[in-house]
Amino acid sequence: MSHQNHDEHSAHHDHAHHADHADHGDHAGHEDRGDHAGHGGHAGHAGHAGHAGHGDHAGHAGHAGHGDHAGHGGHAGHGDHVAQFRRLFWIMLAIAVPVVLANTMFASLVGYTLPDNPAIAWISPLLGTVMFFWGGIPFLQGGLSEIRSRQPGMMLLIALAITVAFLSSWGATLGVLSHELDFWWELALLIVIMLLGHWIEMGSLAQSASALDSLASLLPDTAERVTGDGVETVSPADLRVGDTVVIRPGGRVPADGRIVEGAASFDESMITGESTTVAHDVGDTVVAGTVAADGGVRMSVTAVGEETALAGIRRLVDDAQSSKSRAQALADRAAGLLFWYALGAAVLTVIAWSIFGTPEDVVTRTVTVLVIACPHALGLAIPLVVSIATERAARAGILVTNRMALEAMRTVDTVLFDKTGTLTVGRPALSALGPVAGVADDELLSAAAAAEQDSEHPLGRALVRAAEERGLAVPVSTGFTSENGVGVSAQVGDRTIRVGGLEMLRRAGLDPVTDASEHGTSRASTVLSVLRDGELLGTVALADEVRTESRQAVDELHARGIRVAMITGDAEPVARAVAAELSIDEVFAGVLPADKGSIVASLQADGRRVAMVGDGVNDAPALAQADVGLAIGAGTDVAIASAGLVLASSDPRSVVGAIEMSRRAYRKMQQNLWWAAGYNLLSVPLAAGVLAPVGFVLPMEVGAVLMSLSTVVVAVNAQLLRRLDLRPEVLFGSKVEARSRSPREERATL
């Protein structure tokens, strides 16, 4: 190893300022930890210091409604409308039974005879009128709203259909129109089906929110706040930033905070979707709603109420539910076009049957066209799929902040990972030992760990942790000292152990080139030398620890035909070593944060569809530039506005889950759109009598049954997405389905 290479390794230990460290002596300055403060925050990315507040999302609070459903009369919340449509559905279903059974047209269709009682003839008209003005009111109001906004669409078509059915049925009942236009049973069926469809839709949308709203119930009823006289019990709502709170073993965290005393493993599954507990120590950030599994801690509150991570996550999902995907926009346009299609078909029907038929035929066919054109299946086609997809994704820790991003993930052909904190843990770990002849590996590591016992530097802690993981008996040390730019020193028994960089070796009169170069390892490591009483024991190499899940994620992306690239501010040797370990296709090393966006743009200029995956700290330009931005670490950093998807866990395999959901969801959208639009496009001409010259005219009752079936098919097809479990441990436990189409083929369908 050359002297220059040795310097190069030393630069690796500080992730924030690689270029600032000329040698390993910087490791020695344990007492002056200013340069390393940022490093501590990378401990597993469990807590991004300083991001506990979510003020940037304050504006999201207003997205509780169902804003995109223009016809719903200004939904304030999905929960209220679930109850409204559920209640209306059951009431209307109860009323619809006598309306249908007492209807002469239905009786003749099914083949039974009604009792010869004049009162029975008025059951359908009277109860049908109740259904129209009570059960039909949401659709009538929605239709009026669309007229006022001059944006005819789904609700106006539904309102038109039930209004035409209602008026024509009364005309037939009073003898003004043909008895064939007695549509009371179709009106009842129409209203019940529409209410059922909206109940399903609202319920599905509410499930996405309720899956996250349930997080609020995870907050404890009380919190123990430390006061000058002891501890007082208060409501979490009474906590303020800066308060110190006691979290006992098994207790829930009442607010976001930073641990100031103690250590414990925390169950964060409700935030990240990960089933394993996460160890947190002094200085680490913990999130409201998580559980201290095996220890008690004291924490300082950093965020409360709407500023907590839980509130931020709910706002992200609310934004996703109020944003429109390309497919949803297509469905909305289709509904608007269908209104004019139905209106045009009705006009042509009037003209054609006025020429070739009777006045009675004109009314019958025109009414049939307007009733059958009701597009409720089309209205369910996209909202159901997207809401179920976002709900399933949220349960797996994938938060959809923009529906367009969910849809675009299926077309991605290049995934660009930020290295530190994404593919790697973001903290150093022992990578290799280089003992001199006659010294065992365990002896070298034990000596280094003994000297570092009292160190708080990330590299020192990594050596102690490595010794503990190997089960080594680390001897007790005394007299710990450190010298900035040199190294650390401690007494172990009657011997002096020193750990440090090049300057330490020079002071000891050792030649770094001849005495240490053969005992280091990869150029990707930070290499420290260990001396005992002035003699070289060997070197220890530490490197940013690669996540165990990263290999699976990269392999699966390759299996799907997706190219994997990595971008980092690290030096070229460091980046190349990680890339080689993970079989990454392309590496961009030594990139400044401000230049990451231009790297993404250059890939896009080559015709690639790029998904950028970063921890959101320095990656905002690249996340915004990418076709899809995925921010990792949402549990404590939900204010990342640049990303379309946020991965609540730090597991890179979640990227595969996002792609899988995108592809599955888009297939469902396509299926539903074709089925719903296809029904309308075919049934309207048939109802108008386009095949009348060959003796076939679609009966109204058959059209009504087909309309109901199309709605049920669309709803059931969307519900099939609920079978998909996107959690990494499930998705990778049994190999995910092989890619159905290449990204290029996916883009061709846009």
Image (cartoon, rainbow, N blue to C red):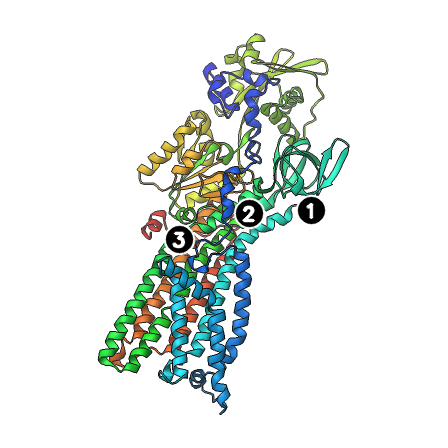
Asked if 91 appears above or below 247 in the picture, the reply is: below
Q: Are marks 3 and 2 in contact (CB under 8 Å)?
A: no
Q: Nearer the viewer, residue 437 or 155?
A: 155
Q: Position of residue 372 (x, y in %)?
A: 37, 71
Asked if 14 appears above or below 556 in the picture, the reply is: above
Determine if residue 680 is in view.
Answer: yes
Say which label, 3 or 2, has the lower sequence index: 2
Asked if 129 appears above or below 612 in the picture, the reply is: below
Label 1 crowd (10 A; few <14 / some 14-19 / many >=20): few
Q: Residue furthest left?
A: 355
Q: Position of residue 24 (x, y in %)?
A: 54, 17
Q: Position of residue 745 (x, y in %)?
A: 33, 50
Tell me the element at label 3.
Answer: loop
- Please state which amino acid type lies under the numbered disc 3: Ser
**Residue 729 tag number:** 2
Say which label, 1 or 2, has the lower sequence index: 1
Residue 148 image-quadrant placement: bottom left
| Numbered-mark total | 3
Label 3 crowd (10 A; few <14 / some 14-19 / many >=20): few
Report the Cα–Cα distance between label 3 and label 2: 22 Å
Q: Say which residue label 3 marks.
A: 740
**Residue occupying image coordinates x 54% and y 65%:** 86
- Please state which amino acid type lies under the numbered disc 2: Glu
Tell me the element at label 1.
Answer: loop
**Residue 221 tag number:** 1
Label 2 crowd (10 A; few <14 / some 14-19 / many >=20): some
Report the Cα–Cα distance between label 1 and label 2: 32 Å
Say which label, 1 or 3, has the lower sequence index: 1
Q: Nearer the viewer, mark 1 or mark 3?
A: 1
